[in-house]
Image (cartoon, helix red, strand yellow):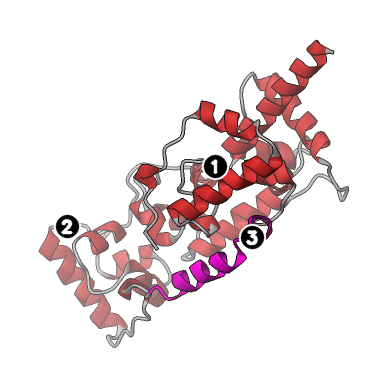
Amino acid sequence: MGQYNSEKIVQSRQSFKDILNKSDRELLDIIKNFMIKNNIYTSKSYRHANFITFPTIKRKFKLKTWDELMKLLKLSSEHKEAVKRHKKVIIPPSFEKVVVTESNDELLEMYKEFSEKIGATNGASMKQLKTHGFKYSETVLLRRFGNWKTVKERCGYSFRFGPKYTLEEIQRILLEERDKLGRRLSQREITNNPNLPALETILKVFKTSSISKIWDELERGMEKTTTEKIYIKEEVKKSLYQEYLKKGKTLTILEIVALCKEKKLPSANVIYRCFGTRKILEVWDILLKEIAEEKKANENN
């Protein structure tokens, strides 16, 4: 079968509206033909397609999972085959387990020699280790010595930040980037993301050497609920829309987390579940469209 090619999947927003106005049977046939034509059978590959979004399809047909959609379209066997093909992908060498034979002193000496070689007079940064090809990743040094400050100071360098960031600023930046992706970023993604502070800065501000612990802390804040009650979607919509009217524009994920702590909104995860997406921009898009449609219907009545 042909490979998925996003360049040949181009639809206008207007055509999506026209498609969604068709009968359920016609709409399902269009979605099925689209998937077959473009060799798309997994949710991961469908996310890259410029077509009707999966959250929209879920709402339209009251589905909860991708598996349910595949069964509805009678594409379960194709889906299973596609999943098998993805599982056969070879793991890149960068994810293979690295065996470090050098002692602590030898590692530090390697780091100093490397820093001198690239002209880093105050010691190479984590990003420079990768950019200029140090033998090991920064993770090896962090695991051996606990934090970047210890690495720098044991080599005779001073430990200082570039731009100064507060804990609140870094929390906001990380949550915004997480919201764009719909999941937590890996250490590699943080290192390569120009919109984020340096990885060593983030670890230092949170006083940890583990990025997973940082995400755990941030996501615990997202999961805090105002009460033990179960929220229905209409309640969540009403609460969010009231805050939208107060501010005069959409709220960021950090603002929602703050209002959750003040018991003015449900948790971010409750909101995500109600709207069937992990991206706050999509939540607002869905909410405001539904509010507009409701107002229009009331005017017509």
Q: In this view, does 134 lie above or below 72?
A: below
Question: In the image, what residue occupies the spot 46% across and 35% down?
Answer: 11
Q: Is residue 159 above or below residue 30?
A: below
Q: What residue type is labelled 2?
A: Thr
Ranked by sequence position, the earlier of labels 3 and 1 is 3
Q: Which mark is residue 74?
A: 3
Q: Name the residue under label 2.
A: 121
SS of the residue at dot 3? loop
What is the quadrant of the C terminus in the image? Answer: top right
Question: In the image, what residue occupies the spot 70% across and 41% down?
Answer: 24
Ranked by sequence position, the earlier of labels 3 and 2 is 3
Disc 3/disc 2 C-alpha distance (Å)? 62 Å
Q: In this view, does 261 lie to the left or right of 160?
A: right
Q: Position of residue 203 (x, y in %)?
A: 45, 58
Q: Position of residue 135 (x, y in %)?
A: 23, 74
What is the quadrant of the N terminus in the image? Answer: bottom left
Q: Mark 1 points at which residue?
A: 168
Q: Start and end of the magenta stretch?
A: 69-89
Disc 3/disc 1 C-alpha distance (Å)? 48 Å
Front position in the image: 74 or 70: 74
Q: Quadrant of residue 286?
A: top right
